[in-house]
Amino acid sequence: MSTRKNAGYNVAYRMFSVLLPLVIAPYLSRTVGTAGVGLYSKAWSISYIFCLIGMLGLNDYGVRTIAQVRDDREELDRTFSAIWQMQLMVAGATLLFWFGYVFLVAGEERTIALSLSLMSVSCMCSFDWCLMGLDQFKQIALRNTAVKVIATACVFIFVRNKDDLWIYGLAWSLSTLLGNLSCALSLKGKVSYRRVSIRESLVHLKPCAVLFISVMAVSIYRTMDKVMVSMIAGIEQNGLYENAEKVIYCLSGFISAIGTVMMPKVAHMQKMGETERIARHIDRSMDLVICMVSAMAFGVAAVADRFAPLFYGEDFRYSGVLMVPLAFTLIMIGFANVIRTQVVLPQKRDHIFVKSVCCGAAVNLIANACLIPSMQSMGAVIGTLAAEMTVPVVQYIILRKELPYGQYMKHVTAYAVIGGIMLLCVRIIGRLLPDETWLNLGIQTAAGIMVYGGLCLAYWKTAKKGLFRERTVHE
């Protein structure tokens, strides 16, 4: 399957996966309130950390390793078998610790946490890393989409008040497990299990553990901030922060989807020694990603103050205030993601990834500890901004002599200027249409799309860009 189709399937699936919770959010916000949203966010955040431990960096390491051996069926089978055996050992041990947390440590979120236990179980049978390494994105997208639609229907039918939050957790964790089991069927004929020794499985433990350090560091400033807001500022503040971040997380799905498709492709090109082709690929990817994330960042910042109360309800108006600075993390995430998935990981320079995200996590923890007590949820927003900025800065310090950062920054500057003009135009229209209605929000959004699109077309023509003329994704 071509990279274009893989990217299409993966982007569609990733966006569908993050859009469903966003579709449910208005209903859930009005049904359980800020306290209910905050309580579920805390339980899910802790569950997610255990899932990350159970997967131990496989979502990066597994994809890269399978992509490098996929042309040799014998080696592919042995590598898959060894990695899966390691996965079973790590995920099984993590599951035991999870139940220890649920029954011995969890507080008011215990019932919700127990309903999320299937998330940890699903880590034992998650084969996305293998399918992605084989460039089999269609199966992942189609099979998981079906079960998530059913889960969404269950939420609307059965969740009626705050006491029903455990049903919400059970629906999503069960859908994850069923999705993983259905994807396992897609491996038939593509890879086979072979009995390998425990020693052969443990060979993969160390490189996975190295990547896990970075994955865990990312979770600190993507997940632990919610736990810290809950503990320091209260559940309601976390509810406001959760709904603000949910929109940004949804949009960042575009970025991660593109990076997920490109990583096995670049890893394979790296093995073939196609250095010049990789360099062109990275530059074009950076141009495309920065174009996308700048549109998202400036667009969200322009309409967040109206979107939040209309979408979530009046109680979540402050979520719109939090969205404005959070939106600009998308530019940093996009920039860092291209470097990570197309330079660092394909070249097996995992230490760069580890250093960058560990520095980001440290900055985030320090900022949160200092700012949340006085600024509450806004303190967490500032901490996230600082953390996301730290990651590409550390990457730059290490790779500045190897990569054409000057060219990359030209992309950032050009689209930031275009985005700034769009934001200004949308704000002006907002002043002319002061009523907070979906119609006026739609007019602002449509105007923003027209301004950004028109300016981008003018820029591409002026700069003689072949963004759409060249079939870059087929390289």
Image (cartoon, rainbow, N blue to C red):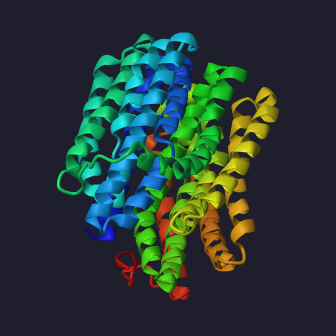
- Quadrant for residue 123, please give it: top left
Judge left or right: residue 445 versus residue 190: right
Locate residue 319, reporting x and y percent: 60, 35
The reply, left or right, for residue 458 in relation to residue 128 is: right
The C terminus, quarter of image: bottom left
Percent across and percent down for residue 335 are 60, 63
Q: Specify whether residue 200 is in view.
A: yes
- How many dots with numbers? 0
Q: Quadrant of the N terminus?
A: bottom left
> Residue 443: x, y in percent?
46, 53
In this view, the residue in front, 265 or 169, is 265
452 is higher (above) or lower (below) than 239: below
Residue at point 45% right, 13% down? 111
Establish if 12 lies above or below 180: below
- Residue at far left of view: 189
Q: What residue is at 44 percent from the left and 60 percent from the top?
A: 64
- Which sits in the foreground, 443 or 315? 315
Closer to the camera in the image, 326 or 398: 398
Left or right of residue 242: residue 160: left
Q: Position of residue 454 (x, y in %)?
A: 49, 73
Image quadrant assignment for residue 411: bottom right
